[in-house]
Each structure stands twice: as structure tokens, then as C-alpha cells.
Image (cartoon, helix red, strand yellow):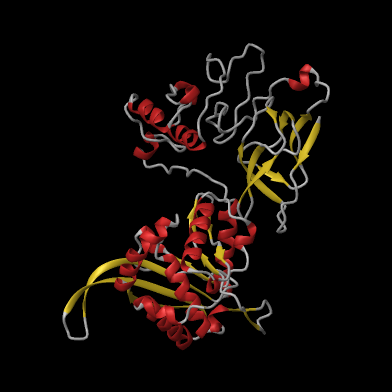
Amino acid sequence: MSDFKLPDIGEGIVECEVVEWRVAQGDTIEEDQPIVEVMTDKALVEITAPEAGVITKLYVAQGQIAKVHAPLYAYQAQGEEDASADEQAPDTSLVREAETPVEIDQTSPGKPSSPAASGSGEALHGEAHHRKVPASPAVRRLVREYGISLTAIAGSGKAGRVLKEDVLAHVDGKSAAAPALSASSESHASGSASAPRVEPLRGVRAVMAKRMVESATTIPHFHYGEEIDVTELLALRERLKPQADAQGERLTLMPFFMKALALAVAESPILNAQLNESGDELHYYPQCNIGMAVDGKAGLMVPNIKGVEHLTLLEVAREVGRLTAAAREGRVDQADLKGGTISISNIGALGGTYAAPIINAPEAAIVAIGKTQWLPRFDDQGTVQRRAIMTITWAGDHRFIDGGAIARFCNTWKGFLETPETMLLHLA
């Protein structure tokens, strides 16, 4: 039997959280087969099998922390002699999350319960026999919140998998009792405090918390707001969409924002500069690597598109689509998270009108884009017209960027977006 040790993932990472086991003890595996997903402070990483064999033990439960160079799982390589019966006996304390989760001990949320000490096969829950119930992590969380047993719910999914609808139907059948976090409804009625559900801050969310505190406390921010009339830009996009669709690309406004930003940076290179750690040097970067904040399932990620100034609009659209999909799944490559020089946060996609963004250090600036609204505006002749107005808010590093610099830069960017055909004069 061989132990597979968690490899050095790089970036100085010394531990990670086990997100999902793709196998269970006793499973036969093939070389390069996905075994487990782990979450670092950067992204979700899939670990594959080094060789074919049989899984004999899982050392780290889902939701627990695995250490680099420590055993993650044990396996018997293909061709080796069978281990003893005792060594091969199933260990139900760790099982595959996606297919065969164990019954949850309601007194210790999130921890698998162990089978009864006797060999009778009786579980901890009364006289019911212990059985493995297929359910997703979200469904098990819902079950814990309602304080009910997973084995008591009839699953309507494949192989008896319990779905969210099954849980809600089961609850409705019991007078739809409100979810219990850690205190009963009587405690609310009596006025006693209810304990909150505790969730460890790990992975991407943990590093986001650390970096946002560092950025907000070490960089003197100042904000600059503006309105941009994107009526003509919307019309241009509608004209170009059929051609983009024909090439299999989804053309949103983001590629236009980025191309205009790269052109504006060429005229105001200080917005693409960064202050060194000692604070005595400015580094001006030749490439405009534009980051975009994506709210993914692993937390906030800011992958960036390299060298936007050299890419076509369709190439930028392709990269936007690729990185958005990857970030939402928490699977962004390390290279896509490094080297950003300026960032965009499109809060308007979620309905926000204004936001005061925090700089993605060590970058010098970030812009928050609000939602676009159709509003009445006066034209040059004093006639009221219906125009598409988008609000934006810049945050700049006030150690070396002043209000005048960011105002001039924003005016250039705004000009490209309000009269998008002018970008043609500057494209290489």
C-alpha cells in the first residue's frame, strides 16, 4: 500500500481545504483519473491519480485541511498483492461526497458520524440501519439547517439521490418547520439569543479578506465618479453581435470597456504603474493587463487579460468568456491571476448603480461600473432625449495619482466609449 502525499502546488502554499472527493475507499482508479478537488488561497485545484490501483484509505475528510507533503490518501498500485481483509475493510468515516455521503451527526454539523461499535450494522440514529445516502453538499447543508435526518428523506434522483426538492417536500409534510441553526423556535419566543452557524473562512475568501484589509489600510484611496453616455456604444455592439455570434463569441460591453481602457492608459501611463514595496520607485508597465472581478462559487477572483492593447475586440471577448467561466467554477490558472496592472469591477451586472471599489494591490487603480439606465438628457439644442447612462467610480492610489491625473485619464476613456468609432484611429 502506498501513501499519496499532497504535492507542492507552488506559490508558497502550505495547506489547502479538501473540497470534494471523487472516489471512495475500495474504488478502482486509473492513471490520471481525478481523485480529489482541493481549494488553495488562489483557486480550486484538481488532483489526479499518479497510477492505476485501488483506493484503500482517505486520510482527510471533506471540509478539513490537508497539509502539503502530508498523506492525502492511500492506494494499492495495480499488480500488487491484495492487502489483508482487515486492511481492506470499508471505512465509512470518509466517503465520496458526490455519490455516497455518510449520515450526518446533527450534534456536530459538518462531521461524518461513525458506525455503531457493534457489528450489527445499526447506525447512531435509533434502530435504523446505517446507509449511505447520495446528496450534494448544498442539500446536506439544507438538511442540517432543518435539523432532520438525511436517511428519513426519500430521494427522487438517480440511484435514490436526495434533491433539494425532496428535502423541501419532506419539510412541508411536517408543517414546514423553520430551519433550525442551533436553537429552537421556543428560544426565539422566549427572547434568548440564537447561536449563529459557524463557517470557517478558508481558501479564496480567506485570502480576499486578508488582501482587502491590507489594501484598504496601506493604500490611501480616493474616489472619482462620472456618468458615461453609452447610447452609441450599445448601438455599435448590436451591429457587431451577429458577426461575433457567427464566430462563436459572445460580445458583451466588457471588451469595449477594456479596449478603451488600454487606449486611455497609453495616454496616461501612470495609471498602469505600480509603487514598489519600499515606496521609493514607480514601475511603469509596458503591457496593459486588465483584471476583471468575478464573483465565483469559491469567492471573489480577479483574473486578468494580458496585453489588451495588442488584442482584437473578438480576442478580448474570447478571453473574457474563458476567464469568467473559469472564475465562476473556481478553476482559474495561476498565470491568469498574476501580473494585473489595472482592474474593472462590473457591479452593474448585479444591479448596482454606484460602488466605491477597493484597489487590487499592488495596482494603482480600479473602476466600478454601475448599471446602465435609460434617462432623459438634454442635447446641444436643449431638446430632451432618451439616453443610456452608465455610472462609474474610480479608486486611485493617492500616493502617486492625484485627482487631476485620474480626471484626465477618465475623460479620455469616456470619450472612446461615448464615440466608439474614434477608437479606430488608435488601433494598431
Regarding residue 9, the answer to whether it shows in the image is yes
Q: In the rendering, at what x and y percent does residue 53 appear?
A: 75, 29
The answer to which image quadrant residue 83 occupies is: top right
Name of the residue lying farthest toward the bottom: 404
Which residue does the image show at 69% across and 79% down from the upper left?
A: 278
Regarding residue 398, the answer to whether it shows in the image is no
Which residue does the image show at 35% across and 63% down from the upper left?
A: 352
The answer to which image quadrant residue 70 occupies is: top right
Name of the residue lying farthest toward the top: 120
Judge whether 406 appears above or below 98 on screen. Answer: below
Judge whether 19 appears above or below 88 on screen. Answer: below
Which residue does the image show at 47% across and 72% down from the upper left?
A: 259
Nearest to the observer: residue 219 or residue 33: 33
Q: In the rendering, at what x and y percent does residue 346 appear?
A: 42, 64
Which residue does the image show at 72% across and 30% down from the upper left?
A: 57
Name of the residue lying farthest toward the left: 383
Tally the marks: 0
Q: In the rendering, at what x and y percent does residue 3 appear?
A: 79, 36
Quadrant where the N terminus lies? top right
Nearest to the observer: residue 284 or residue 299: 284
